[in-house]
Image: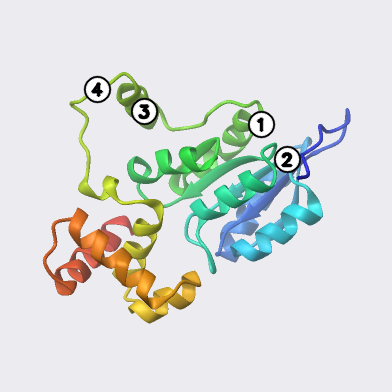
Amino acid sequence: MAMTKARAIGQKTRVLVVDDHPIVRRGLAGLIAHEPDLEVCGEAEDAPAAMRLVNDCHPDVVIIDISLKSGNGIELVKQIKAHDPGIKMLVSSMYDESLYAERALRAGAMGYINKEEATDHIINAVRQVLRGQIYLSRRMTDRVLQRAAGGNWLEHSDIDGLSDRELEVFQMIGQGLSTRQIAAKLHLSVKTIETHRDNIKSKLNLKSGTELTHRAVEWVLQQS
C-alpha cells in the first residue's frame, strides 16, 4: 500500500479536486492556483477517475464532493483511506452539515466545508487538514464536542439513524430513481436495493413505498 511521502522543501503541496460540476472544479482550481505553495495535480468528476488520479499524481490532500457523477463521496473517502491512509481529505458539499459532517469524519476525512462557505474558507480548510487538524464550522464543532461529552439534549433527526449506504439510496429515491436504476448506479443487485428500502422504511417508520418516496423527495428538496 503506497503511502504519501513528505514533500521536499520548496515543493508544492498537491491537491486533487473531485466534483461532478466543471465550474466548481475550475473555481476551486483557480483559488488554489493563487497560493504559491499549493497546486492542483488533477480534477475528477467521479470515483473511478478519482482513484486513478490518486494512483497517478499522489496528492497530499483531496477535496471531495458528496454527490458525484458516478459513485459517492463518502464511499470514495473510505476507498482512499484504505488505499493510502496518509492522504488528507476534505469534504465540500451543499448537503446539510449536521447530517453529513460526522459521516465524513467517520469515513476518514479530516474536515467538512459547506460550498456556500468554500470561496472564503477553502484555503484555510485545506491548510488546517494538512496540519492534521479537523476542520468544521464553529456550529458543527460545538455539536460534535457536545455529543462527545454525552449531551443528550442535542436534536437528532431519524435520518441520522440511516447507514451511509441507506442514506445514499434514500437520496436517490428522492431524486426520482427507480430501484433498478439505483441498483445499476451503485453496481448492486435489485434485491440488495430492495433490502435497503425495507430497512429505510423500518427506521423512518414508513408504511409503504409511496410514503418512502414522498419522504425522500421532501428531504432532497430541503437539501437543495
The kind of residue tagged 4 is: Gly
| Element carrying mark 4 | loop
Task: Say few, some or many: other residues with alpha carbon within 10 Å of mark 3 (under 14 / 14 to 19 / 20 or more).
Answer: some
Q: Secondary structure at mark 1?
A: helix
Q: Amino acid at mark 1?
A: Leu
Q: In the drawing, does residue 200 fall left or right of residue 21? A: left
Q: Nearer the viewer, residue 126 or 202?
A: 202
Residue 130's mark? 1
Numbered tag placed on residue 60 in the rendering:
2
Left/right placement of residue 219 relative to residue 89 reads left
Q: What label does residue 221 carry, if any? A: none
Where residue 3 appears, as percent x and y from the top left, is 77, 39
C-alpha gap between disc 4 and disc 2: 35 Å
Q: Which corner quadrant holds the C terminus?
A: bottom left
Locate the N terminus and report the quarter of the image it occupies: top right
In the image, residue 189 sits, relative to residue 112, either above or below, namely: below
- Residue drawn 14% across and 71% down? 208
As shown in the figure, which amino acid type bears the numbered disc 3? Answer: Val
Residue 76, position in %: x, y? 57, 54
Give the quarter of the image for residue 179.
Answer: bottom left
N-term mark: 2 or 1? 2
Judged by depth in the image, the label closer to the viewer, 4 or 1, is: 4
Q: CA distance from mark 3 to mark 2?
A: 26 Å
- Lower sequence index among marks 1 and 3: 1
Q: Is there CB contact under 8 Å for labels 2 and 1? A: yes
On the image, the x and y values in percent for residue 210 come to 16, 74
Residue 151 is tagged as 4
For image coordinates 18% across by 73% down, the residue present is: 209
Q: Earlier in the sequence, mark 4 or mark 1?
A: 1
Tell me where residue 86 sits by quadrant. top right
Residue at 31% across, 22% down: 146
